[in-house]
């Protein structure tokens, strides 16, 4: 049986963008200031992606700031450092609705996520903390 495809966003889902923005004191467009190479891994993300990778074909789908092309490489370097088994499985896009797959895990709705043709899990919008446990329960209960 062919594995289902899951796209996972980076910032706010597996890399702790919000923590870096808060620590830097950037409230307006923190994406123009954050050092993407130094972001922490969101708690639970490493274990969750390892588990999902056993049952699904995982890809990273991320939107780098258009005005900072250097960040595109920084995101790649971050993946290689923290999730080396996902190297060459990263897609840079500003239109996540164009992705073809089964599940999209993303914390934003501004890049076509609501129009993704598979199932969109709006990560961290119903909880006070980043919660990979709830995401995994949703996927394994409803999507296998």
Image: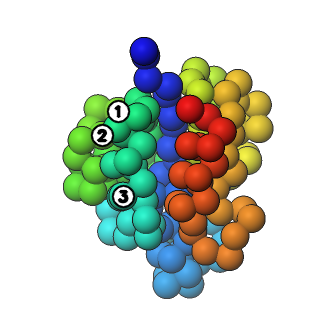
What is the crowding at mark 2: few (fewer than 14 residues within 10 Å), some, or many (at least 20)? some
Query: Tag 3, which secondary structure?
Result: helix
Task: Tell me the residue that label 3 is attached to.
Answer: 47
Q: Earlier in the sequence, mark 1 or mark 3?
A: 3
Res 74 seen here: no
Q: Earlier in the sequence, mark 3 or mark 2?
A: 3
Residue 58: give its label: none
Q: Give me the residue at 42% from left, 15% from top.
A: 1
Q: CA distance from mark 2 to mark 1?
A: 5 Å
Measured as percent of width and height from the top left, residue 129 is found at: 61, 74
SS at badge 2: helix
Q: Residues within 10 Å of mark 3 (few under 14, many from 20)?
A: few
Q: Is 82 on the left-hand or right-hand side of 42? A: left
Q: Are marks 2 and 1 in contact (CB under 8 Å)?
A: yes
Q: According to the image, label 1 marks what residue?
A: 89
Using the image as rendered, state which of residue 103 and residue 71 is in the foreground. Answer: 103
Whole-Å distance between the Cαs marked 1 and 3?
Answer: 18 Å
Task: Provide residue 52's location: percent of width, then percent of height.
Answer: 42, 43
Q: Based on the displayed image, in which of its 4 quarters is residue 104 positioned?
A: top right
86, 102: nearer the viewer: 102
Under tag 1, what secondary structure?
Answer: loop
Residue 99: percent from left, percent from top: 58, 25
Relative horizontal placement of residue 56, taking residue 21 as reference (left or right)? left
Residue in view at x 66 percent, y 39 percent: 142
* Residue at the extreme top: 1
Question: Which numbered disc covers residue 86?
Answer: 2
Q: Is residue 19 above or below residue 113?
A: below
- Quadrant containing the C terminus in the rendered view: top right
Front tag of 3 and 2 = 3
């Amino acid at each position: 049986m062919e594995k289902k495809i899951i796209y996972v966003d980076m910032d706010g889902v597996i890399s702790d963008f919000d923590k870096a923005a808060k620590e830097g004191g950037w409230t307006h467009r923190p994406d123009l200031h954050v050092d993407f190479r130094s972001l922490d891994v969101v708690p639970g993300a490493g274990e969750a992606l390892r588990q999902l990778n056993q049952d699904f074909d995982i890809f990273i789908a991320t939107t780098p700031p258009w005005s900072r092309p250097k960040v595109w490489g920084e995101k790649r370097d971050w993946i290689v450092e923290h999730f080396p088994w996902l190297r060459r499985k990263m897609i840079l896009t500003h239109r996540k609705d164009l992705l073809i797959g089964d599940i999209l895990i993303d914390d934003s709705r501004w890049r076509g996520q609501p129009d993704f043709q598979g199932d969109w899990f709006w990560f961290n919008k119903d909880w006070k903390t980043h919660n990979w446990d709830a995401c995994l329960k949703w996927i394994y209960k409803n999507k296998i």
